[in-house]
């Protein structure tokens, strides 16, 4: 991959990959590491993409894999994963920008497991369908739907709001 | 009462759209290809310098040996290796070894003298 194409993909998808990494890891430093590893892989693998969407999905997939690798590495090295490390609502740079509702939702999301957070992010923020998510994560569509349903149920219980 | 799906979607989307990757990270990523290029060049330079140093050592040591003995060491070494191989081959075929005395060679003198005697007859 030439430098110009690499820079173009950074311009296009850096924020997307960063958000995925942040929603999975909930830690800004880890998110930066994940993003960096993802783009280093892009540079190393000399991949040919059919179009930008193909590149985007590949980057998302690699970022998610990098998150899992980071968690596995931490587990192997017996480094305690600081579950309180990041909370979007508590982070100084964002807390002022978020409304009470957003803060409440982010705090609830922090309590979900990583596999649910990833599905929620891909479905609600990136706008992918369950079929597309199943292709990106290489799991069955049924599994995606189940995870989404459980994530919503957990959020509903945590938010304790008035639902229809 | 609120619609669960719509609520999560709107709040989540709104919150995450406020998040952008830090500029510092972007700069660091943009710098990766040139940093890798620099690293690659540094490795190549290191290999070239090591190879040049080895070559210079080789030439200088040969010059020193040539000045002292009249022959560069690389010829002496290859020559002695050649002799060693030749001796081995000759030993295998029961031929005398280079540099060995005649006494060390196993010659059937009776056979030889008989032949001479027969010829004399």
Image (cartoon, rainbow, N blue to C red):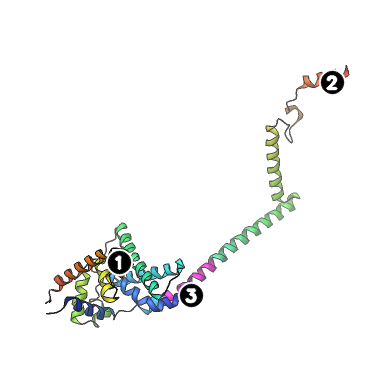
Residue A36 painted magenta: no
Residue at image point 20% right, 82% down = A99
Report whether mark 2 lies on the same chain as mark 1. Answer: no
Residue B38 painted magenta: yes
Give the quadrant of residue A119.
bottom left
Q: Badge 2 is on which residue?
A: B116
Q: Nearer the viewer, mark 3 or mark 1?
A: 1
Position above or below: A69 against B103: below
The C terminus of chain A lies in quadrant: bottom left
Position of residue A110 in the picture relative to residue A56 (left or right): left
Report whether mark 3 lies on the same chain as mark 1. Answer: yes
Return the residue nearer the eye: B67 or A50. Answer: A50
Report whether mark 3 lies on the same chain as mark 2. Answer: no
Q: Gap in Å between the C-alphas at discs 3 and 2?
A: 90 Å
Return the residue nearer the eye: B12 or A30. Answer: B12
User: Where are the magenta residues, as a range?
Assistant: B27-42
In the rendered image, residue A39, in percent from the top left (x then y), is placed at 41, 70
Q: Badge 3 is on which residue?
A: A3
> Badge 3 sits on which subunit?
A
Q: Which mark is residue B16?
A: none
The local secondary structure at tag 3 comes to helix
Q: Nearer the viewer, mark 3 or mark 2?
A: 3
Q: Residues within 10 Å of mark 2 (few under 14, many from 20)?
A: few
The local secondary structure at tag 1 comes to helix
Return the residue nearer the eye: A131 or A1. Answer: A131
Q: Badge 1 is on which residue?
A: A134
Position of residue A51 in the picture relative to residue A20 (left or right): right
Residue at image point 71% right, 47% down = B76
Q: Taking the image as drawn, is residue A111 in sight?
A: no
Q: Gap in Å between the C-alphas at discs 3 and 1?
A: 31 Å
């Amino acid at each position: 991959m030439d430098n110009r194409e690499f820079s173009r993909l950074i311009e296009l998808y850096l924020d997307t990959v960063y958000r995925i990494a942040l929603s999975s890891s909930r830690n800004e430093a880890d998110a930066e590491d994940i993003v960096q590893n993802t783009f280093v892989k892009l540079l190393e693998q000399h991949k040919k993409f059919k179009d930008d969407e193909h590149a985007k999905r590949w980057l998302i997939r690699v970022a998610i894999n990098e998150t899992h690798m980071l968690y596995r590495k931490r587990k192997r090295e017996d480094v305690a994963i600081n579950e309180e490390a990041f909370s979007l609502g508590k982070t100084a740079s964002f807390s002022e920008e978020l409304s009470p509702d957003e803060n409440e939702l982010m705090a609830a999301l922090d309590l979900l497991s990583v596999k649910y957070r990833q599905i929620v992010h891909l479905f609600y923020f990136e706008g992918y369908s369950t079929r597309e998510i199943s292709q990106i994560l290489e799991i069955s569509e049924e599994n995606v739907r189940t995870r989404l349903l459980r994530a919503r149920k957990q959020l509903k219980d945590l938010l304790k709001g008035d639902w229809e | 009462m609120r619609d669960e799906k719509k609520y999560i979607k709107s709040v989540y989307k709104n919150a995450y759209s406020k998040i952008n990757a830090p500029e510092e990270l972007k700069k660091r990523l943009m710098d990766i290809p040139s940093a890798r290029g620099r690293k690659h060049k540094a490795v190549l330079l290191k290999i070239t310098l090591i190879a040049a140093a080895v070559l210079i050592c080789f030439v200088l040591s040969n010059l020193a040996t040539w000045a002292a003995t009249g022959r560069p060491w690389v010829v002496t070494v290859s020559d002695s290796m050649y002799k060693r191989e030749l001796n081995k081959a000759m030993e295998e075929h029961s031929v005398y070894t280079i540099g060995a005395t005649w006494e060390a060679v196993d010659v059937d003198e009776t056979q030889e003298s008989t032949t001479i005697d027969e010829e004399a007859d």
